[in-house]
Amino acid sequence: MGAAGQGLSTDEVQSIREALAAGRKPKVVFTASAGQIAGQVGQVVELTDPAVSDEFVVVRFGRDELPFSPADVAVAPRGAGRKAAEPQPEPQEQEQVQAAPAEPEFVLDRVPQQRREEPKVETVEAKPAARRPVKAVKPKGPAGLTVTLAYADGEWTVAAQQGSKSLAKPYVVKPAEALRMVALVDVPGVHEAVEQIMAAERAEAEQQAEKLRAELAEIEARLAELREAR
């Protein structure tokens, strides 16, 4: 059993927890670390979570229920908190008082009067309420940024958007620049699709160049004939 001044041990806290579970409210005495109420007796009514606060021993003292740490209280000794019975006069004294001669002017009342108990003023040191851990609020980050490289109608375009705000409207870039951008994406399927587009564009450009060369040869031959006709 813990002595006043030493606080509750781990085994005593467990014993109190089992007593509360059985419907009992164990008595404890306040130690010197409890302050002005040291030596007073209270009843444990609850054990809260010690992970939330060191003051998890809730003690009823008078009309208040306040949290304390295990160092503030100790297991009360048996009989603590009970009022001592007032001494009753001995039977012989009562007989002697009754046998005394009746002399009104000198009669002494030897029967002890009942003592009036003065109201006790209980001083309770206010304990700060256990603070619940405040969750840290994460600052809101910037909106997501989206850069889009697109191909349509024989042209490569790039656009940029942050959240719902458009940072850059689609603008045309050269195929070589588009190819360098795609090279940064390590996805084989994307590379193959771009290569197919580039190959198709090369084939179409070569056909147009061949056609233009043929047309240019006809024009130059016609021009040569016109010069000879002078």
Image (cartoon, grey):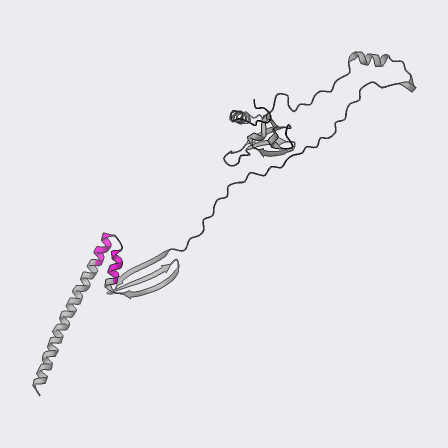
Q: Which residue occupies 19% across, 64% down? A: 201
Horizontal and vertical percent position of residue 155: 25, 65
Is residue 89 rendered to the left or right of residue 36? right
Horizontal and vertical percent position of residue 200: 18, 62
Q: Quadrant of the N terminus?
A: top right
Q: Quadrant of the C terminus?
A: bottom left
* Picture layout, residue 35 above or below residue 137: above
Q: Is residue 25 visible?
A: no
* Picture layout, residue 103 above or below residue 119: above
* Picture layout, residue 96 above or below residue 64: above
The magenta stretch spans residue 179: yes
Q: Which residues are magenta?
A: 177-194
Question: Looking at the rendering, which quadrant does residue 166 occupy?
Answer: bottom left
How many numbered marks have been drawn onto this rendered protein structure? 0
Q: Which residue occupies 22% across, 52% down? A: 188
Question: Looking at the rendering, which quadrant does residue 158 occupy?
Answer: bottom left
Q: 6 or 102: nearer the eye?
A: 6
* Picture layout, residue 57 above or below residue 152: above
Q: Is residue 211 visible?
A: yes
Q: Which residue occupies 86% across, 12% down? A: 99
Horizontal and vertical percent position of residue 75: 58, 25
For the stretch drawn in magenta, the main secondary structure is helix
The magenta stretch spans residue 188: yes
Horizontal and vertical percent position of residue 226: 10, 84
Q: Residue lying farthest bottom?
A: 230
Q: Residue lying farthest left?
A: 228
